[in-house]
Amino acid sequence: MGQPEGCATLEAFGSSALVAVTDVAELDTARSVVERTVTDFDVACSRFRDDSELSAVNAAAGAPVEVGPVLLEAVTAALKAARLTGGHVDPTVGQALISLGYDRDFELVAGAGGDGGGALSRVLGSVPGWRTVTVDPDHSTVRVAPGVVLDLGATAKALAADHAATAANAATGCGVLVSFGGDLAIAGAAPTDGWRIRVTDDHRSGFDAPGQWISLSSGGLATSSTAVRRWRTSSGTAHHLVDPVTGRSADSVWRTVSVCAGSCLDANIASTASIIRGETAAAWLEEQQLPSRLVGTDGVARHVAGWPSEGDDL
């Protein structure tokens, strides 16, 4: 990000987060609202908390579980993602991720190094498919088939960014940008020249990392990458983007895909699906009219659907 004034950073969802406002006097209020949103989504949607609502659903052995509005919306959004992408973004990848070694907060997985891996030497986890999940909005229940493990990592963080930005804008009356792990949402009036954003493989990179400066005034931006959230296993390197067809980390022609859309959720659905789709992603994004930047494994950036090419280091 290129907004040092009127910004605050915090930890959220096992990653770094940023809150930016157009009125510096409202920064503390905006941050407080964002922190409440993070707590609400963590309690509802975390796969790594034994006391989360999601853990209760996963442990219910096929029985419907009454849940709160946050998880109900998050699971509904995840099923929307699966439907829109033809199953490329599938919330039932939880067991596959566990089998790959991603069975706790990522900093613990990464910190374990090779000892934290070894999972690929076991039987790969299956991906039962999103149609094994049932949401009953009338009774506020979620049910998964026995043995299915939901993981909402591909959509819940982006949905949380949308909620946080909207709530902070309502509380402050000024323009707000919220970024969770580089996936960001904008609400309210942006600065005159838009929010200036540095797009790279890893949102934690410094401004000198290879990438591109862009400006956004509305909507959302999401980046999915195989270059981050990687860990070693006895069978090689794994990452968190699972191909539902194979149950393995996706072997994609793209190392990073960034997408702009009307919301952070829609942007994240498209960026994640693009990694899984591989070679057909660029044409698909063009058809969806979603401005996108795709960086191949060869390090060359491709720009589609109106994403500017000027000033890209790659």
Image (cartoon, helix red, strand yellow):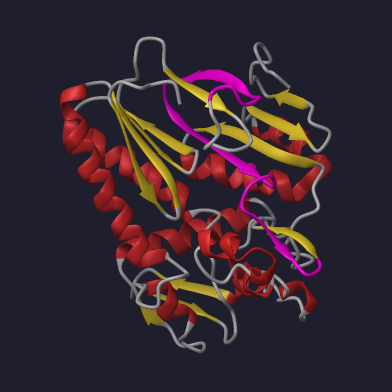
Residue at 49% of width from left, 79% of height from top?
Answer: 58
In the depicted structure, whether residue 59 falls above or below residue 216: below
Which of 16/70 is in front?
16
Q: Quadrant of the N terminus?
A: top left
Q: In which image quadrant can residue 28 be found?
A: top left
Residue 306 vs residue 296: left or right? Answer: left
Residue 68 vs residue 94: left or right? Answer: left
In the depicted structure, whether residue 268 falls above or below residue 147: above
Q: In which image quadrant can residue 247 be found?
A: bottom right
Which of 55/80 is in front?
55
Can the viewer see residue 192 in this picture?
yes
User: How far across and down, in percent of the image, does residue 73 sit?
Assistant: 39, 59
User: How far across and down, in percent of the image, does residue 17 sit?
Assistant: 40, 42
Is 8 within the magenta? Answer: no
User: Magenta segment range?
Assistant: 207-235
Residue 243 vs residue 142: left or right? Answer: right
Which of 139/216 is in front?
216
User: How far across and down, in percent of the image, does residue 47 sit?
Assistant: 47, 69
Residue at 52% of width from left, 37% of height from top?
Answer: 204
